[in-house]
Amino acid sequence: MPDSIHFKIRRQDGPGSDPYWQEFRIPYQAGHNVVSSLMAIRENPVTVDGQRVEPVAWESNCMEEVCGSCSMLINRRACQACSALVDTLVQPIVLEPLSKFPVVRDLMVDRSVMFTDLRRVHAWVDIDGSWDVHTGAPRISPQEWDLNYALSRCMTCGLCMEACPHFGPDRPFLGPATLAQVLLMNNHPTGKYNRTERLHAIMGVGGLTDCSNTQNCVQVCPKEVPVTTALAVLGRQTTAQIVRDIFG
Amino acid sequence: MSTAKPTTIVVGGGLGGLWATLRLVEAGIPVKLFSLFEVKRSHSACAQGGINAALDTKGQGDSIRQHIVDTIKGGAYLADQPPIKTMCEEAPGLIRTFERMGVTFSRTAEGLLDLRLFGGVRNKRTAFAGSSTGQQLLYGVDQQVRRYEDLGLVDKHEWWEMLSVVLDAEGRCRGIIALDLRDGAVEAFPADAVILATGGLGLVFGKSTNSSNSTGAAASRAYQQGAAFMNGEFMQYHPTAMIGDDKNRLMSEASRGEGGRIWTPRQPGDARDPQSIPEAERFYFLEEWYPAYGNTVPRDVASRAIWKAVKHMGLGVRGEDRVFLDLTHLPREFVRRRLGSILDIYQSFSGQDPCETPMEIFPAPHYSMGGLWVDWEKDLTTGGMKHGSPRNHQTSLPGLFACGECDGAYHGANRLGANSMLSASFSGRVAGEAAAAYVKGLARAARPDLESALDEERRRQEEINRRILSSDGKENPFVLHRELGELMTNKVGVERDNRGLDEAIAGLQDLEERFEHVGLDDQGAWVNTSLPYARQVHDMIVLGRVMTTSARQRDECRGSHYKPEFEISIPEGKFPGDPEWDDYLARWKSNNERWLKITMAHHTAEGPEIDYRPVDTSVLPVETPRDYR
């Protein structure tokens, strides 16, 4: 059992500034995860060289892998920091911000593009209003529910986007997380009324055809969202849409 | 300044805030929506088990009346009853609306909404989406708000923190002061009405089941500016949390609703592998003590029972503060389908598979029944809350509304499981409608000048920031927070006594004084996470004083507030008809005459000042004590 936990953290003071590395050591404690370690560091932010520095900035909230905040690269792997248990990691534990999003500070990145893209693909069901119309949605079979529920667990954490070779700051690709939400909305009994609009949004530049099926996305997803299944189904839906567009 | 078009501000983007936003926009009023982070990451996502509505689709003859009765009694009669009545009546409509939004509720074989059992009730009444219901409900309203954002009707201010509300010369809330969490700028935002939907305060206890942003700071700030805080002493300890060093992770009550059993070895200190302990040597104490409700007694009852088994009978697993929550007797496929996401949480953080090994759990701070006091108007025809009244969910500061966990309206002394997502959604909806009615009814021309009020309050907030940032004080905000959490956990827990509460009050005063000497390692402006944290710590200490002082003054046992010294116990083995029961009933009634009243805390420079208000019991007379045996 080690008596300390050793971190090597890539820091960056702001969007325009140069990154640099700092190393920290905290006393070993069983059960530590990366977020709880960062909390321990911020209480006494002294590097291994004895230099007192500004606490590391990172994002976290729920601490149980359901809010999607604490995405980062841990030993070069994209994961949720709250569920990354120190005992399972090789030391020094190397922490870096996600590389596909602009750095805000240290380990914090700006993932707003994912939320903007949800608007681009019409990722909602068009309802008359948020009042009771005294009737629920049409029935949904337990089999359909299985897939829809799995898709609805996407927490927009960005890990699949990080792992995708085609998603990036200078590339138009919508990315796996956003595309999977299109299928969820298209599957809903009334959400499908706007299916054409959503499919057109993913048929142009940056759409579905930018995916080369590397399957990286589905491997890193912490919620086991069936992203590649969704992309395959969307492939069939867009093909059918092309036919409909031509023949009306 | 008189703004030309009405504007409103919603602070907080969980279930309550997003519902309020929807209803304001649908009333034709644009919303500025403030949140500490992307609203989709709000703590509502952590709610697991489900949302209650008496849909009566399980052949059990469930009824709205029974939902009302269960909620009122579950809360030990301490909440005004007409708003509860209306909430329960409108619950089925809310579920239908969520369903239309596309929420992936779990289905029966027929493709209809499935229902499960929850605590403190006898009928299946809880709609759910696997065991991540809060996440799915939050995403449903998040998508609808995004739609209105796309239409330009919602202007999101994510990565902003509300520092204070702005009051004009008449004491009306006319906007907020907020801190840009990126560049550190402090700005004033005028509005005709403000809705706080800022969630719970679990972080006052250091470790809780709450997200690390659930500090209660925004509610505390409103309280310090004059809003009354009600029932602060009522903090729910969730009986089944996975205890961690960084946080306590909730293991949903749904696990018991679906058949999970709580037990501990009968033999003290038994260190055997739980699976090797024979049935006869297991103590299923909830089932033994409460045969009628068994494992699904209400949370306050379950937490006290675990406390008793562990702390008083010395029966914790291996002698530690743990008991088992056992699912291993249930079919794996069934458990995975109904509870998969909480099993994943348990397995991720413990490395053990709950289908193979019983989970180890203990009570942890979870939900604040108390919160900002909010008004409501009675509908004299229905006896419920009047639809569309601008009084509904308005705090004691005119123009400032509150909804969700940061208000204290619905749950009295103890909240029933799966009623929180209901109250968050319902109260958000009502607050949005009420704020819309309030804004439309304002005599806007005659209002006092706002410019100077905005300016003055902004300067005051900037000065607080400047003082903290330039301080060379030696007090570390992170250490102060840890000490606050330990103090509250040790002294204001499942069991309380007046000596401990007095010590806590003194300790909190000491922490507040030490906060004056707080100093930060980060004194920069760009994404300075220490500054907002330090300010939250101060506001948490203030809330701690409210909770502790309220608890000190209430000399009785009611719901989650338990002072053994003042307990009026149900006579063992006695039921209505027995003379001992009649004697108990008489004592219970006379205690209600003294203590059935809502605690109201008001901020003063010397600390909280407490007075009380009567409870409206016009729906269900206070005749029957809670009895889950």
Image: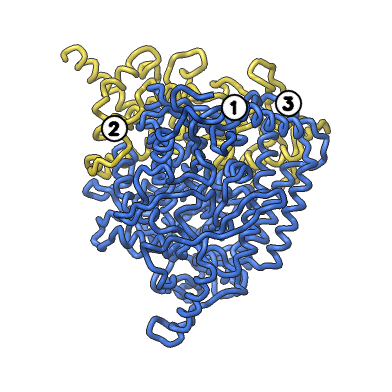
Chain colours: A yellow, B blue
Q: Amino acid at mark 3?
A: Gly
x, y percentage for residue B76?
47, 65
In the foreground, B623 or B254:
B623
Confirm whether circles 1 and 3 share one chain: yes
Query: What quarter of the picture does the N terminus of chain B occupy?
Result: top right
Label 3 Cα neighbours within 10 Å, binned few <14 / some 14-19 / many ≥20: some
Q: Which residue is mark 3?
A: B524
Query: What quarter of the picture does the C terminus of chain B occupy?
Result: bottom left
Q: Choose top left, top right, bottom left or bottom right for residue A24.
A: top right
Q: Which residue is mark 1?
A: B188
What label does residue A127 carry, if any? 2
Q: Is residue A144 above or below residue B66?
A: above
Name the element at disc 3: loop
Task: Please name the residue shown 41% across and 25% down the image.
Answer: B153
Q: Amino acid at mark 1?
A: Ala
Left or right: B399 as drawn, with respect to B313: left
x, y percentage for residue B415?
47, 57
Task: Please name the residue shown 50% across and 29% down the image.
Answer: B446
Q: Is residue B434 above or below residue A187?
A: below
Q: CA distance from mark 1 to mark 2?
A: 34 Å
x, y percentage for residue B206?
64, 50
Task: Please name the residue shown 44% across and 66% down the image.
Answer: B297
Name the element at disc 1: strand
